[in-house]
Amino acid sequence: MTGPPPYFDLIREMKNPYAYRLAMVDYARQHGIKAAARVFQTTVPTVRKWLSRYQQHGPSGLIEQSRAPHRQPRQTPPQIEQRVVALRRQLPTFGARRLIGEFDLPLGHSALERIWRAHGLMKKRRKKYQRKQDLAAVKSSWRLFQQISADTKDLVDIPRYWPQAHRLRLPWVQYTAREVRSGLQFLAYASRRSAGASAAFAHRIQMHLERCGIELKHLIWQTDNGSEFIGELQPDGSRSGFPSALGDSSHVRIPPAAHTYQSDVETVHRLIEDEFFDLETFHSRSDFLAKAALYQLYFNLARPNSHKQGLSPWQIIHHLEPCRPLRLCLLAPVFLDHQLDPQGGYLVPRHPYKAARMVVGPSDSMGTRRRSRTVLACRRSLRRNQRRT
């Protein structure tokens, strides 16, 4: 009869050696300590230790106990421990190494973290999506048209769109503006980034909002520090281009590399790529513009937003301010290149669909008719919904 494998080899591989020790103790009680040591291939002191613990504490004595020393001769003095606890509460975002460097604390970062952990001050860092949810809760208390976030999106790196853009001379840059509280978005397209296109984009949206009764003096536009949004500094201290096109509205720029400030519009860029550019096939420039307009209508009127209680932008606007007209959501996308005046200014037609017809060539007449019928059908559907509400 061969006994079990050596005791210490088995113990190292076991996650819970309780059952094995219990069997060894039972064998020692029946056949003696030396016999148990031979059968379980361990030492007599080991069997005696676990048998003694079992006799003193019962089955719980066979559970592994901590091997930490009972006294710590190099333990952090109480006054230093109190100081690092107070510093942690005062500066909760400072890490252990930074706090030690800033305040010349006479202990290592492991000891510092051990003290914080003992006082319940080591909180798990919230992940990006959790912090985004916290920020969404703050923005849900804002009023409508308190802030619009604007940005541009490069379309040259989208595999499905790239060959179509080359073949049909489609735009390479998307201009996006999104109202933060409701998520309402406005789109436009251009062949490249430029101060003139940005100014035309902002001016067109400002005119539309003013016609819909929005008080522009209470509106803030937020952008990054791209050259298309900065404008040129004038002798009187003002800036031309995009800032000038905002009129009575304010313009704020995010700190450099602080991309999370633009999370609202950046999220829309990802959604548009997934739901529009990665799915659609275009036959002409007018077909592209028509489909972009339909996607924007879908996004503003019907698409539920999981981060806004499953409501669409129009549902949020109608709930908060029922007096707002539906046409607030109906500003269709345009090609900004065709809104620019050759002399350097910009022309914005009152009716956005006229701009789409300007860029249609002779070969696009069928696409124009398809677009027109689609737009008319959307208008009829929207009028019916407006009468019902």
Image (cartoon, helix red, strand yellow):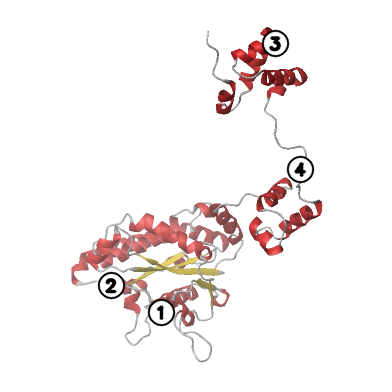
Q: Which mark is residue 195?
A: 1
Q: Label 2 amino acid?
A: Arg
- How many angstroms separate mark 2 from mark 4 (CA)? 83 Å
Q: Nearer the viewer, residue 211 or 339?
A: 339
Q: Nearer the viewer, mark 2 or mark 4?
A: 4
Which tag, 2 or 3, sits closer to the chain's start?
Answer: 3
Q: Nearer the viewer, mark 3 or mark 1?
A: 3
Instruction: Bin the neighbour count of mark 3 within 10 Å (Cα to Cα): few under 14, some 14-19, many 20 and up.
Output: few
Q: Nearer the viewer, mark 2 or mark 3?
A: 3
- Report x, y in % for residue 62: 69, 22
Q: Which residue is mark 2?
A: 357
Q: Which mark is residue 29?
A: 3
Which tag, 2 or 4, sits closer to the chain's start?
Answer: 4
When the figure is inspected, residue 210 is found, relative to residue 78, above or below; the finding is below
- How many angstroms separate mark 3 from mark 1 (CA)? 90 Å
Q: Label 1 amino acid?
A: Ala
Say whether residue 386 is visible. no
Q: Which residue is mark 4?
A: 72
Where residue 273 sits, quadrant-wise, is: bottom left
